[in-house]
Amino acid sequence: MTSLYPEIEPYAHGMLQVGDGNTIYWETCGNPRGKPALVLHGGPGSGCSRWHRRLFDPASYRILLFDQRNCGRSTPHASAPDTDLASNTTANLIDDIEMLRLHLEVKQWLLLGGSWGSLLALAYAEAYRECVSELVLWGATTGRRKEFDWLFRGGVAMLFPEQWERLRDALPATDCGGDIVEAYYRLLNDPEPVTRERAALAWCTWESATPSWPPLHGLAARFNDPAYRMAFARIVTHYVRNYAWLEDGVILRNASALHGIRGVIVSGRFDFQAPIGWAWDLKRAWPRAKLELVEDAGHDAANTGITRKLIRALDDFRIS
């Protein structure tokens, strides 16, 4: 199978209380007796989508999806200005995943993660390696500081100078000389609704430019919803300003925990958000993984070549 599987609907869904006043949305699709597979969405703050369901053979997999804290259908939602994101951390997301595994009575599962989801999958797998059978990753990132700085503090700006200048020009004059992430974090938490919305629009317009080539000069369709883009921008800046609460390089240093786990890493040759060098470093630290390059792709998993390789990997892992 090299094309998306047909549309399916969940056969079960619910809300799970995970502490700190947070409740996460979860759903299960496909075969209730199939091989468990968990989707970890990107962003952070994107939420799971119907598209994720269609990567899996529904006759073979018990497909599990959830919205991470404060996004999608999880509550409270980060689009609300009074939603406190203090407890939305990488460590707590890992705990949420483990709580969901126990709630759904899963012994071991495959993890599918893209972009931010790939980092979260790696962090969870290193913490709970006995619970992970395989990893299928795309747009892989390992959470090093240079990776965050490349995308959000001007590294990739050399390839997108017009879009980066617009992002900077949208800042008040008092913020132009400082850290751009800190500046947008403040604006997105400003008491004035107009200030917050302008900041979310500018941030998400920048996020729209870099996934594919040639760059998109406007706003990606997924950001048309004001609540979605506000939550996305707030959560992303919250994570980036804190470097996801990870020690620099810790994922690669602990990669020996992955050596018993089979894996596939799919990377676009022209992925400007997560350059293939990040995936190459991960492959070196995790020799059992197979690195699959897509020559004409960027960071967009909907690219036909990336989609095909993800589906092929998931098809190959249908039987443990």
Image (tube, rainbow, N blue to C red):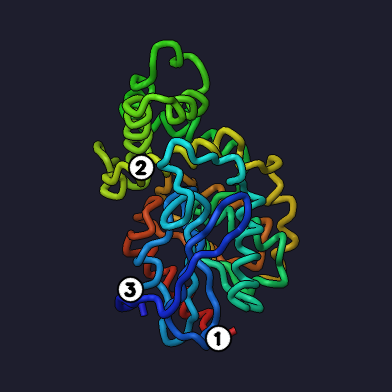
Kindly check if marks 1 and 2 are in contact, taking CB atoms under 8 A apart as contact: no
- Judge left or right: residue 195 versus residue 125: left
Q: Secondary structure at mark 2?
A: helix
Q: Which mark is residue 229?
A: 2
Closer to us: mark 1 or mark 2? 2
**Badge 3 local density, few (<14 within 10 Å), some, or many (20+)?**
some
Q: Is residue 132 above or below residue 278?
A: below
Which residue position holds label 1? 319
Dot 3: element: loop
Single out the residue that lies furthest toward the top.
174
* SS label for mark 1: loop
- Residue visible at 63% across and 54% down in the picture: 19
Q: Mark 2 Cα within 10 Å, few/some/many (few <14, many 20+)?
A: many
Amino acid type, callout 3: Leu
What's the amino acid at mark 2? Arg
Say what amino acid the circle numbered 1 marks: Ile
The image shows a total of numbered marks equal to 3
* In front of the other: 195 or 90: 195
Residue linked to disc 3 = 4
Report, in whole angstroms, how far the alpha carbon at label 2 lies from the one at label 3. 27 Å
Between 214 and 42, the one nearer to me in the picture: 42
